[in-house]
Amino acid sequence: MTQSSAKPAAQDGLAFERPLKELQSKIDELRNLSKDSHLDLSDEIATLEDRLQKQTAEVYSGLSPWERVNVARHADRPMTSDYVQLMLDDFVELHGDRVFGDDAAIVTGLASMDGVRFLLVGHRKGKTVKDRLACNFGCAHPEGYRKALQKMQLAVKMKLPIVSFINTPGAYPGIGAEERGQAAAIAKNILEMFEMPVPIICLVIGEGGSGGALGIGVGDRVGMLENSYYSVISPEGCAAILWKSGDKAPEAAEALKLTGSDLLRLGLVDKVLDEPLGGAHRDQKATVHGVKAQILSWLEELGKLSTEELLAQRYEKFRGMGNPHAPKKARK
């Protein structure tokens, strides 16, 4: 997260992706050769493309939890700003917490999508170095969570559903944030989101770390993308506490059970959304299309419930979290 520009991670690739990048380079080389020399290399290109697809499927089907964490942090992975641009028909951003300031790490606004209106709340990481620094790499201050709460309260007054995009390694850990009531702000959000009489959908689109994620993470439907993670702490933070060494982050990621399959089994999420072959960073538009379809489906489903049913189901849902034997309704 301390890269000198927005692109190096995407250019260098993840360690386990290097064989895939080598194959892709060969394909690109043959295409250029075919174009420049007018040779027919279509059979050779098709063979390599088929091999690349099979190898990509093999690699991504066997990723370790730590490798999925790294995919969740990929520089080209679609962020909240990409969903706003590619998914929404209209978006009016709302600013400020009316107390301290406007935290850039949290974006809120009135949105519409295929004729459906809702309030969007999400973590914002930024793409350039300047934007990332302004957004604290998605680590929100207490004013960010207060802003989110105020706008969600506005959604309640307007009787609009709420959609939350989670993508943060955790809340900002600085002294100033603690002095301004970081823990209390997150706790208040969690408490009040339980009682909001409108449908709430939460989706982990990348990183879902600690209370920073939970501050906008209480909902009637909680989903996550296939290569995202959701955890009480980042693997590095866990390793630093337990082993006093960041080198143990892969072991921590394994122990934390932070990937979709484990979280689905434990009832912490309702659904794990598939990503395009090779991860969301390889096809942003396809990823956004899948997320849009799922959100619309959930909004339609939740819109049929009365306020009493909505709140009762939300309460029972979180009461049953962590218990693999608790009865759960199938989610579409």
Image (tube, helix red, strand yellow):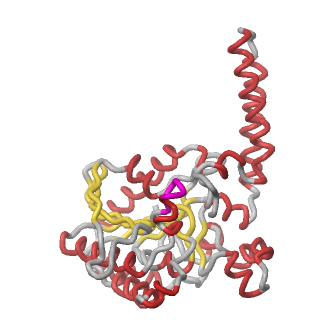
Left or right: 301, with 243 as reference point? left
Spot occupied by residue 160 in the image (x, y as percentages of width and height): 24, 67
Work out whether residue 58 or residue 239 is closer to the camera in this orientation and state it: 239
The answer to if 128 sits in the magenta stretch is yes
271 in magenta: no
In-front residue for pair 173/162: 173
The span picked out in magenta is 125-130
Question: Is residue 86 depicted above or below 236 in this figure?
Answer: above
Residue 99 is left or right of residue 208, and the answer is left
Which quarter of the picture shows residue 35? top right
Q: Nearer the viewer, residue 315 or 52?
A: 52
Determine whether, in the image, residue 218 is placed left or right of residue 252: left
Quadrant the N terminus occupies: bottom right
Examine the image and state in which quarter residue 31 appears: top right
- Residue at 75% x, 41% y: name it: 21
> x%, y% of residue 95?
29, 67
What residue do we see at 67% from left, 80% from top?
237
The tally of labels here is 0
- From the top left corner, tell me how far across and down residue 309 is, in percent: 31, 79
Residue 262 percent across, percent down from the top left: 65, 72
Which residue is located at x 80 percent, y 74 percent?
Answer: 247
Q: Residue at x 27, y 61 (%)?
A: 110
Direction left: furthest residue:
158
Magenta segment's dominant SS is: loop
